[in-house]
Image (cartoon, grey):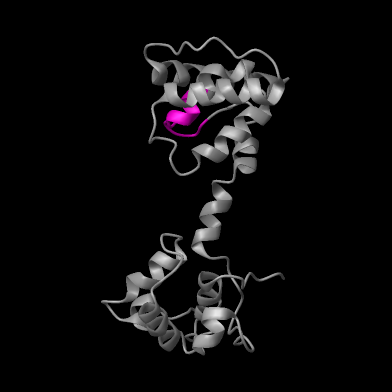
Amino acid sequence: MNIPLSTFADRAWYAYQCLPRGKNGKLPSLLKVMGPEKRLLLARLFNGERSDPRQETRAIIAEALKVPRAWLDLGEGEPPKLTGPYKAMPRDQKMREQDPGEWIKKYEAIGGIPTATPNNFQIAVLCFGSILDSKTIEAVAIEARNRENSEEPLYWAERLRLAQIRLTGGAGFRLELPKDALQASASLASNEKAHAKKAHAG
């Protein structure tokens, strides 16, 4: 198994999984490892909210995880031994869920069928899905990652239009979202779902 140890966060997560475990095989909680005032230091690191802690913070983390500072900071020396199965860091699990390649598969390469209320990026894709190239969606999905609702559907529609022109060399679609884009996208998703069920039934 290829365990990532290239960054401070990678090594901290690995060191956490080398701590002594309880009888049930569970690792100690971050509260127990760091205490009530410092537990958020590790939580933010493991969730990808912080990547480069200050020097004094690094010293606290190294002491709490019971590893040499040189190894935790720079990867120098031998890593500690795992005390159980290695699990991916929450940050990496989150990134994998939001990977544009996975997004394309999940939404059937052309926008597909969201299982819940579509975000602003998905609304734009659904409204123009029938004329979008899958490479266009993937390219803009990379840009949209983690901020799908931080811009209006019209913004993502424009990004899709420009990406379509750039990647396919063809003309962009006419940029005209329905007045109620959310309702229109929900209707499109419903129609696609019905079509998919009909095709599956043969």
| Residue 201 among magenta residues | no
Name the outermost residue toward the left.
37
Closer to us: 22 or 139: 139
Residue drawn at point x = 51 percent, y = 18 percent: 127
Image: 155 above or below 79: above
* Residue 79 figure quarter: bottom right
Residue 153 picture location, percent across and down: 43, 24
Residue 161 picture location, percent across and down: 56, 20
Residue drawn at point x = 40 percent, y = 21 percent: 182
Q: Quadrant of the N terminus?
A: bottom right
* Residue 106 figure quarter: top right
The mark total stands at 0
Residue 24 picture location, percent across and down: 50, 81
Residue 96 picture location, percent across and down: 58, 52
Closer to us: 23 or 159: 159
Q: Quadrant of the C terminus?
A: top right
Residue 105 in view of the camera: yes
Q: Is residue 166 left or right of residue 46?
A: right
The magenta-colored residue range is 114-124
